[in-house]
Amino acid sequence: MSCLFCRIVSGEIAATKVHEDERMVPFADVNPQAPMHVLIVPREHIASLNDVTEAHDELVGAMLRRAAALARERGYADRGFRTVFNCQAGAGQTVFHLHLHVLAGRTFNWPPG
Ligand code: AMP
Ligand code: ZN
């Protein structure tokens, strides 16, 4: 298995996991870009947002709700948080296993860099 995030999901590579369930494994980003930086990673290997189909609607909805729940647990529901899917290298995707970034704890600019 060569995919880094599949190896983290399986436990072969260590990560600081938070609140995993049967569908997804959220874990702390190893190179955090904000005081809170969690990656919400589905157990299923999906290369990018380009590969998400109708069959994934429930999964992606659950990922987004998990993002909001984690932000709320950490006190960021009202202060604000940023959720990002980078899709393809031109948008900054470096790991080709779908993941939702959840960032909070600082001010975020718009438009993003
Ligand atoms: P992206 O650039 O959108 O594909 O995001 C990939 C993210 O994975 C980056 O923010 C990296 O810091 C993070 N990352 C890479 N390797 C690891 C790892 N072993 N554990 C946790 N996060 C990682
Ligand atoms: Zn994978």
Image (cartoon, helix red, strand yellow):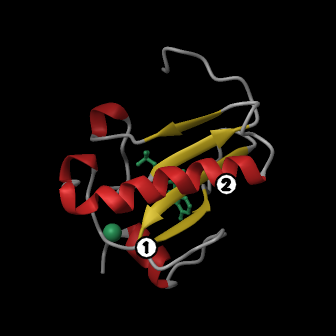
Q: CA distance from mark 1 to mark 2?
A: 16 Å
Q: Which mark is residue 87?
A: none
- Of the residues under marks 1 and 2, which one precedes in the sequence? 1
Query: Disc 2 residue type?
Result: Leu
Which residue, given by chain and number where applicable, does mark 1 sit on? 23
Q: Nearer the viewer, residue 63 or 50?
A: 63
Residue 97 shows up from this direction: no
Answer above or below: position of 85 versus 56: above
Per the image, label 1 sits on a secondary structure element best described as loop
Q: Judge the density around disc 1: few (<14), some (14-19), many (≥20) Cα neighbours within 10 Å.
A: few
Per the image, label 2 sits on a secondary structure element best described as helix
For residue 96, side relative to residue 107 (left or right) = left
Residue drawn at point x = 62 percent, y = 57 percent = 30
Query: Disc 1 residue type?
Result: Arg
Residue extending furthest right?
75
Quarter of the image where ligand 2 sits: bottom left
Residue 11 shows up from this direction: yes
Image quadrant holding the N terminus, namely bottom left
Answer above or below: position of 107 versus 39: above
Image label count: 2
Res 76 → quadrant: top right
Which residue, given by chain and number where applicable, does mark 2 sit on? 70
Rendered location of residue 40, percent (x, y)? 51, 58
Q: Nearer the viewer, residue 28 or 56?
A: 56
